[in-house]
């Protein structure tokens, strides 16, 4: 199995949100709380010694996904072929019957629910239909800074190193998120 | 398994190559996926590198195209101007009314009473105000404005110093710099050619040091800068002049460069050293003014002079100040003192145009027209201004740059000119406004005065896509389509060698028409031959591009949607002038870089001296008014809009609140916390929006991103948060707009209003 993973160059991210909007357009998601790709902003320090960074947060497609373990309907599965963590809307019990256990289990809040009472879980599936066509996910192809990459995690590691921490990224090594970073180091200007 | 999929994947979807073409620094590729006449999703450039990737604004375009707020049919005003009450009418009724009013105004007052206000809402070659301007010209002409808020101060300084606006390098040349100064420049939000941010990141990765001078800790500062130097707004010239002091007194001047390529250094040196006014412009002198520590100024001056090649990129924002010309001139002169002009990795701070395919050879060579005496009258195709004398404060002897005719009114004074006319010293009594692709009420300074002025006109027609604050003042409102619904070409902006062919992706929505179609139907009503206006879009575009030597295959450009021009090497401005100055003089009056400008010396205007100087003005931080209004207002660009365009796009709106940036040091004494609704006000107006309390702006300064829509409530408080409700409408002699030179006070909104949020 070639586990797919994500690379994020935090030093290049300007926080422009192009990846977020491109994703919403591609999946035709209304403005509102459902965002498969999210960008977190981190600000520290006091004037004039400041630091700011952004963190792109799709689903990190963990090797040991906590969401799968807690899902009462076995709606979430990890694909053998590429390690992508996907959700079957037919099996998801929805917000009515399940108190969003997957969302609570995920340290990075990747599972998304729209405001409707019986909303089913949706999340980033790394544009698997694009990957199958040999294309990059829409966020990767959209990033004006070329700060994102997606591919087999071992290849990404060869290309970019193995840094597994970044500013604002909550580390939970037990879940083995399939992500590597070029982190931005906190150093007040 | 019911798995998430994008809608309508499959074969019935066709892809149309088009692009995004509003007035930001980008013109970007969009590939529209069209199914059954509807765009269902967008991609951007996924072709060969360099890719021209759209930013969030372009990616969100579907929500603008299909916005429920689009204007759907022609309308006639039934309420008061500004109230926004309209009734639906037919196109024939609307066009008859427009043409009757044009004819009536012309017969009663003459063509000069027709004020044409073209805007920058569409940056294509064909649509937007281009064709309406041609039509009105054939109708006998019109009065228009001179001066563009974005850059007029920078442009004037560029012309005065170098005699040209072509001072830029292509962005790939940033990789040749050892040191890059981002002075009041935030391309992460303002784009400034699509590859700019990426080039800055790459330059830094390659080892260049980047220093940002800016009152705000912008996204560009956060991402690219090794050092942030916050500076008090409006004092940039003082810091640049103090850097010159260090460079001169420490013997770091590139003497050979000065002697060979410049004139007037001695005069400037005398001013810098204080021989002229007993005030040496030392770093300590500048520290008091700028709030930048003297040591920081000294270090930066040494680094800039010592680490060649170094690129001082002087953004336009600090020139968008009262007397902003002085900042741009000071920056240009610093480039000359250090000899960073004309070499790879250097930069000639100026207007920044790098690539231009037009017949611009004359801008770099001495123009034979230079000898033509324009002092007695400037020829124009617009009959209203043909033969008018030049403005006394213009650089009319130079070729290129801003039209110098005295028949035009500075854009910041349009409202005053409407209200006071010839009696107020303006060239015309204005009776009607023809407004195309312009949200002028929102985007010109002093919006409340603008509303007053628009109410006083006899007739207003507006071509628009949305019910903008300006559109609400129209008597007849004509719905216009977007660039997804027509053909156009996006020409290169300042630095990028490419064209985007905007193929029509879908039919015009509702009853909307293109500006060309509107003119086609107006022409016979105005007694103008339809010939040109009857040509199809594609044919006119072919005509327009026929003189551009870099478009060798129009059809290939159209089918591929983009034409990327390969440059054999990076563009470096003034390379020829530096290599062989005898053969290639600078296009100034003297043929040299004019530290002391001949043209300005002849003008003899104390507010625009022949050498750059640090000058105060009536709303500077140190004037008595600052006791009443102690905060300096910046009106910068938001990443979620292009000026006032894209204001009502939900995907963008949710990313950023239109808030007032205010430092905790200013917020706390006023009892203001993040998210509180606050009032920002001065004698010109009052806006009411949430507070964004942040360390990312220096104390004493507040920021309101320009472009949010002017929305006065019953008491006249602008609850839309339009920055221009607060800005000054008095231009500088060189044309610089004072958009970043307003003093304001801030307070918590009244409690009753607070509850409404």
Image: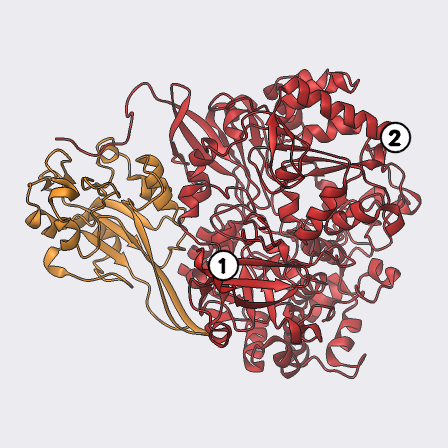
The answer to whether B607 is drawn above or below residue A124 in the figure is below
Q: Residue furthest right?
A: B376
Q: Kindly identify which residue carries mark 2.
A: B108
Chain letter corresponding to the colour red: B
Residue A169 coordinates in the image, percent (x, y): 25, 61
Q: Nearer the viewer, mark 2 or mark 1?
A: 1
Badge 2: how crowded within 10 Å, few (<14), some, or many (20+)? Answer: few
Chain letter corresponding to the colour orange: A
Left or right: residue B231 compared with residue B189: right
- The residue closer to the viewer here, B316 or B419, is B419
Identify the element where label 1 is drawn. Answer: helix
Left or right: residue B247 compared with residue A37: right
Residue B690 showing in the rendered view: no
Left or right: residue A15 compared with residue B180: left
Residue at 29 percent of width and 28 percent of height: B7
The answer to whether B55 is drawn above or below residue A175 in the figure is above
Q: Kindly identify which residue carries mark 1.
A: B753
Residue B459 coordinates in the image, percent (x, y): 75, 34
- The residue closer to the viewer here, B472 or B219, is B472
């Amino acid at each position: 199995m070639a586990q797919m993973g994500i690379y994020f160059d935090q030093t290049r991210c300007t926080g422009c949100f192009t990846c977020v909007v491109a994703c919403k357009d591609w999946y035709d998601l209304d403005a509102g709380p459902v965002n498969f790709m999210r960008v977190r902003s981190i600000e520290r320090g006091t004037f004039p010694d400041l630091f700011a960074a952004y963190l792109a947060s799709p689903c990190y497609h963990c090797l040991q996904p906590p969401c799968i373990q807690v899902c009462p309907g076995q709606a979430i599965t990890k694909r053998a072929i590429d390690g992508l963590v996907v959700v079957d809307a037919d099996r998801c019990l929805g917000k009515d019957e399940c108190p969003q256990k997957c969302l609570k289990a995920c340290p990075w809040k990747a599972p998304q629910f729209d405001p409707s009472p019986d909303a089913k879980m949706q999340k980033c599936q790394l544009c698997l239909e694009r990957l199958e066509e040999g294309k990059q996910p829409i966020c990767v192809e959209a990033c004006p800074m070329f700060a994102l990459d997606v591919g087999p995690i071992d290849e990404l590691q060869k290309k970019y190193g193995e840094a597994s921490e970044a500013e604002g990224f909550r580390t939970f090594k037990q879940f083995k998120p399939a992500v590597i970073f070029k982190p931005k180091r906190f150093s007040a200007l | 398994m019911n798995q998430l999929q994008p809608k309508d994947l499959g074969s019935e979807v066709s892809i149309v190559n088009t692009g995004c073409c509003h007035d930001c620094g980008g013109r970007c590729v969009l590939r529209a996926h069209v199914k059954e006449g509807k765009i269902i999703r967008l991609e951007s450039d996924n072709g060969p590198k360099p890719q021209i990737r759209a930013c969030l604004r372009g990616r969100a375009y579907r929500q603008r195209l299909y916005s429920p707020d689009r204007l759907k049919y022609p309308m006639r005003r039934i309420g008061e101007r500004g109230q926004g009450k309209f009734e639906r009418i037919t196109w024939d009724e609307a066009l008859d009314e427009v043409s009757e009013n044009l004819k009536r105004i012309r017969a009663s007052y003459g063509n000069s009473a027709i004020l044409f206000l073209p805007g920058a809402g569409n940056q294509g070659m064909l649509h937007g105000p281009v064709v309406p301007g041609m039509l009105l010209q054939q109708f006998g002409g019109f009065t228009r404005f001179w001066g563009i808020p974005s850059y007029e101060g920078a442009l004037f300084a560029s012309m005065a110093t170098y005699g040209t606006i072509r001072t830029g390098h292509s962005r790939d040349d940033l990789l040749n710099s050892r040191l890059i100064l981002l002075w009041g420049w935030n391309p992460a939000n303002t784009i400034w050619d699509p590859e700019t941010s990426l080039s800055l990141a790459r330059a830094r990765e390659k080892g260049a040091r980047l220093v940002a001078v800016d009152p705000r800790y912008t996204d560009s500062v956060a991402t690219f800068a090794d050092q942030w130097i916050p500076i008090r707004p409006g004092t940039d010239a003082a810091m640049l002049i103090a850097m010159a002091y260090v460079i001169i007194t420490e013997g770091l001047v590139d003497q050979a460069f000065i002697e060979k390529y410049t004139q007037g250094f001695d005069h400037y040196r005398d001013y810098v050293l204080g021989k002229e006014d007993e005030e040496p412009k030392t770093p300590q002198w500048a520290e008091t003014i700028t709030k930048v520590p003297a040591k920081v100024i000294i270090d930066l001056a040494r680094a800039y002079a010592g680490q060649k090649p170094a690129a001082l990129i002087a953004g336009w924002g600090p020139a968008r100040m009262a007397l902003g010309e002085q900042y741009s001139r000071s920056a240009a002169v610093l480039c000359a003192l250090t000899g960073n002009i004309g070499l790879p990795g250097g930069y000639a701070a100026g207007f920044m145009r790098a690539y231009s395919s037009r017949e611009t050879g004359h801008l770099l060579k001495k123009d034979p027209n230079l000898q033509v005496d324009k002092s007695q009258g400037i020829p124009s195709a617009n009959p209203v201004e043909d033969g008018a004398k030049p403005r006394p404060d213009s650089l009319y002897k130079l070729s290129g740059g801003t039209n110098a005719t005295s028949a035009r009114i500075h854009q910041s004074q349009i409202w005053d000119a409407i209200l006071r006319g010839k009696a107020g010293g303006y060239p015309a009594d204005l009776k009607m406004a023809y407004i195309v692709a312009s949200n002028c009420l929102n985007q010109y300074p002093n919006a409340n005065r603008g509303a007053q002025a628009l109410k006083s006109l006899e007739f207003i027609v507006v071509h628009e896509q949305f019910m903008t604050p300006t559109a609400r003042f129209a008597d007849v409102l004509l719905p216009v389509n977007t660039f997804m619904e027509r053909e156009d070409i996006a020409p290169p902006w300042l630095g990028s060698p490419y064209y985007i062919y905007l193929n029509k992706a879908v039919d015009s929505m509702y009853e909307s028409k293109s500006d060309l179609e509107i003119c086609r139907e107006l022409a016979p009503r105005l007694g103008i031959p339809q010939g040109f206006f009857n040509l199809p879009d594609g044919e006119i575009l072919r005509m327009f591009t026929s003189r551009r030597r870099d478009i060798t295959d129009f059809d290939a450009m159209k089918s591929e949607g983009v034409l990327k021009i390969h440059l054999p090497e990076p563009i470096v401005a003034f390379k020829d002038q530096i290599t062989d100055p005898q053969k290639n003089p600078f296009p100034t009056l003297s043929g040299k870089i004019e530290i002391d400008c001949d043209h300005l010396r002849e003008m003899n205007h104390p507010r625009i001296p022949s050498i750059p100087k640090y000058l105060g003005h009536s709303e500077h931080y140190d004037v008595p008014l600052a006791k009443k209004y102690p905060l300096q207002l910046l009106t910068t660009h938001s990443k979620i809009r292009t000026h006032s365009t894209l204001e009502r796009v939900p995907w963008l709106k949710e990313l950023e609140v239109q808030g007032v940036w205010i430092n905790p040091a200013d917020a706390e004494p006023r009892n203001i916390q993040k998210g509180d609704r606050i009032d920002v006000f001065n004698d010109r107006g009052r806006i009411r929006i949430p507070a964004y309390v942040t360390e990312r702006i220096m104390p004493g300064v507040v920021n309101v991103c320009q472009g949010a829509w002017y929305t006065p409530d019953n008491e006249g408080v602008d609850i839309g948060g339009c920055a221009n409700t607060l800005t000054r409408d008095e231009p500088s002699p060189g044309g610089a707009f004072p958009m970043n030179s307003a003093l304001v006070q801030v307070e918590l909104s009244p409690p009753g209003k607070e509850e409404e949020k």
